[in-house]
Image (spheres, coloured by chain):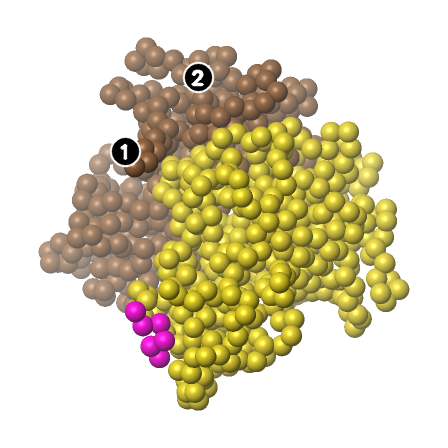
Chain colours: A yellow, B brown
Amino acid sequence: MAPNPNDPSKKTWLPVPEKSDFPIQNIPFGVFLTRDDIITIGTRIGDFAIDLGALHQLGYFKDIPLTDDIFLQDTLNDFISDGKKTWHLVRNRISTIFDINNFELQNNEDHIKIVLFAMEEIEMQVPVQIGDYTDFYSSREHATNVGSMFRDPENALLPNWSHLPVGYHGRSSSIVTSGTPIRRPMGQTLPKGAEKPIFGPSNLVDFELEMAFITTDANALGEPIPIDEAEDYIFGMVLFNDWSARDIQKWEYIPLGPFLSKNFASSMSPWIITMAALEPFRVESPKQDPQPLPYLQQQHGNHSFDIKLEVEITPEHSEATTVSRSNFKYMYWTMAQQLAHHTINGCKVNSGDLMGSGTISGPTPDSYGSMLELSWQGTKPVKLKNGQQRKFIEDNDTVTLKGYCEKNGMRIGFGEVSSKLLPVFQPKPKK
Amino acid sequence: MAPNPNDPSKKTWLPVPEKSDFPIQNIPFGVFLTRDDIITIGTRIGDFAIDLGALHQLGYFKDIPLTDDIFLQDTLNDFISDGKKTWHLVRNRISTIFDINNFELQNNEDHIKIVLFAMEEIEMQVPVQIGDYTDFYSSREHATNVGSMFRDPENALLPNWSHLPVGYHGRSSSIVTSGTPIRRPMGQTLPKGAEKPIFGPSNLVDFELEMAFITTDANALGEPIPIDEAEDYIFGMVLFNDWSARDIQKWEYIPLGPFLSKNFASSMSPWIITMAALEPFRVESPKQDPQPLPYLQQQHGNHSFDIKLEVEITPEHSEATTVSRSNFKYMYWTMAQQLAHHTINGCKVNSGDLMGSGTISGPTPDSYGSMLELSWQGTKPVKLKNGQQRKFIEDNDTVTLKGYCEKNGMRIGFGEVSSKLLPVFQPKPKK
């Protein structure tokens, strides 16, 4: 029997700093540009990035059914298409190669030089070509908070919310990875009491603390994915900051939903943490009342994950302040329910599709997942360590999301997604 | 100076049936599977499909800066990325090759055998890899009709509608081409007067008569496209049927917009008609009142196109009935305004992105672009030639959209997009 890659006692021959998000039990997947300007698929242990394309060429994945160039690609889509069985074979093999008791690569200095990179030497890329990006709205606390502010505190949750995981389509083209700065958007807003909109920079730029999952090819057009099978089609998860412009949103979103208020940028963390690595951190999801319709009912068990989440704001040339601490386990609707709902009408889901959770707010005000909620529409400014305060995000602020699981002394983390908000774009004067 | 490919007196050595949508002045672009199971990019004259990959290999595009494999691809994305100047060079060259006075290919039987296919021999494909699909809502008549039915006849048009081209994101993965049957979707609906939703087949499946335009790479993330430049980034147009399930839509769409009611299928016509071919059919767009904000203001001129549109319903084993006659020129917002608005916040637009007009309804009841409007929510059933009537689309009905321009004896058409609605999907019993 193959050794268990999730075994907390497992050790690697690579140095792993204490409290690292990337012990040998993690084995995330990502895409990076090497010091030689080559794009490759890789994994990470401690502070080393590992070139899986090179490892494969050197024969370390022999006997696993993989095409020769499966890791020599600029996206993970084809590897994800290979399916769950292959993901597990590759993860187990990586776990074996870097096991402290395995000397094959450990003692091969030539090979080590080829496959290992220090994190500073590489540049992480968006790891998948995202065909379609869907964003859900599955935190009851977030939906209640927004409904209270935008509509009516007495009827904050709309009638459909507790019967289905509300979702909508977002913009794939504007998804960037950690480190890519984004621009404050321009747009139309309706000033309070005005009859006509004005044009200018958004004044209410916000983050949204989300996670997202990435799917494999799941179905043919027209064929739903049964809820019992839905988890088999989820490859892994990332941190996701769904940048939002609240003033643009308020003016545009009725009746077809948010559009320009969201599609100027979303930021994802670069390493995809596999569902296999998250397995030890399963927890129950919130009890659902009313009971969902049969196509959304899951068998008893732990369908959520205990993932601790944090948001930091770092003003330019200043220190970071943690402004929110939340947890993925607060999500009312599970990922399996989201995927089953998404396909119940036959909508096709492909490898590399990304599905966001929606803002993850917890029950207490310090666990809210957006400035809109943390500052309660600007009425309760958030204090920063440097003495400043924030109602929303200001130019040159950096917003960083972090996430990790911890249990029995084992920590599996997501790293971070960090993005700086630049001032509005200034077009070059015409010559 | 190069001859004008739009010259109505121009003739080709290929036979072109009278009233064909594809005279030598059209020169659309598409992707097809040949009789030898090879995917290639091609164009069409009369009832012949022309293999551009083969023509290029045979040297007919010499002196035009094209990569060797530009037409040997399964999508048009890379060719569209080459930009407007290249599109024109290629279109002009095709026009020259098939000109009745040009004998180079005309007299080369060996080459003709390689590059020409009868339409029956080939299978048209979705012509672009659609990175992102956006659907607008830009027909004033349609928005007014829907607002009257779903909300309030006194305030049918929402306050933002006349200030910006309302749009939202759709699902790229579910876009198919003409001939692909689609499935009646299952989903949640709220019966009249009920407090809880039920699950079952949608009973109100509808077509939406739309057109869509396809873009080239237009901007970097964060940089708006000025309205004066927007038309340069539009490659061409197609017919587009944005299938909708009205009962699912009504229950799910507040507050984030339509989702499962739309993403089960959209059908596009396979030949992209270039903006160059549509140039002779420019007309003024409707006067806009109130005046839009400056970023949406266009210089005086003809910013719309006179494209006649028709919808046919064909019940199984029966004859077709034309149920609507509309025109693209009714669109209140122009394509340039849509694209300028879409990017005013810096949203990135890529080659192959598809942007739908929204349902195109005209001013009279026989020009409405959906069954929802034609049957006025089912209160005025539409009579078919076979004696049946329709409130919405029934199982095994085929819906066909057609479109063409006509002026001074010249006709440039889109062909058609035709799709049969199959009954709901029946999962195989588990063994």
The answer to whether A338 appears left or right of A259 in the picture is left
Q: Position of residue A259 (x, y in %)?
A: 61, 44
Q: Residue at x 43, y 75 (%)?
A: A97
- Where in the figure is residue B212, as x and y percent of width and height? 46, 41
Q: Amino acid at mark 1?
A: Lys
Picture residue at 52% right of the left edge, 56% below the top: A279
Q: Secondary structure at mark 2?
A: loop
Q: Secondary structure at mark 1?
A: loop
Front one among A245 and A201: A245
Does residue A343 appear in the picture of this structure?
A: no
The part of the chain drawn in magenta is A58-63
Q: Main secondary structure of the magenta part?
A: loop
Q: Chain of mark 2?
A: B
Q: Residue at x 31, y 46 (%)?
A: B125
Q: Is residue A213 magenta?
A: no
Residue carrying label 1: B19
Q: How many marks?
A: 2
Q: Quadrant of residue A268?
A: bottom right
> Does the residue at mark 1 contact the one at mark 2 (Cβ under 8 Å)?
no
Whole-Å distance between the Cαs marked 1 and 2? 32 Å
Residue A308, how many percent across, how many down? 66, 57
Q: Nearer the viewer, residue B312 or A22?
A: A22
Front-lying residue, B337 or A275: A275
Q: Residues within 10 Å of mark 2 (few under 14, many from 20)?
A: many
Question: Which numbered dot is residue A367?
Answer: none
* Local crowd size for mark 1, using a 10 Å CA cut-off: few (<14), some (14–19), many (≥20): some
Q: Which residue is mark 2?
A: B391
Q: At 13% from the left edge and 54% from the top edge, which residue is drawn?
A: B113
User: In the rendered structure, the residue with mark 1 lies on which chain?
Assistant: B
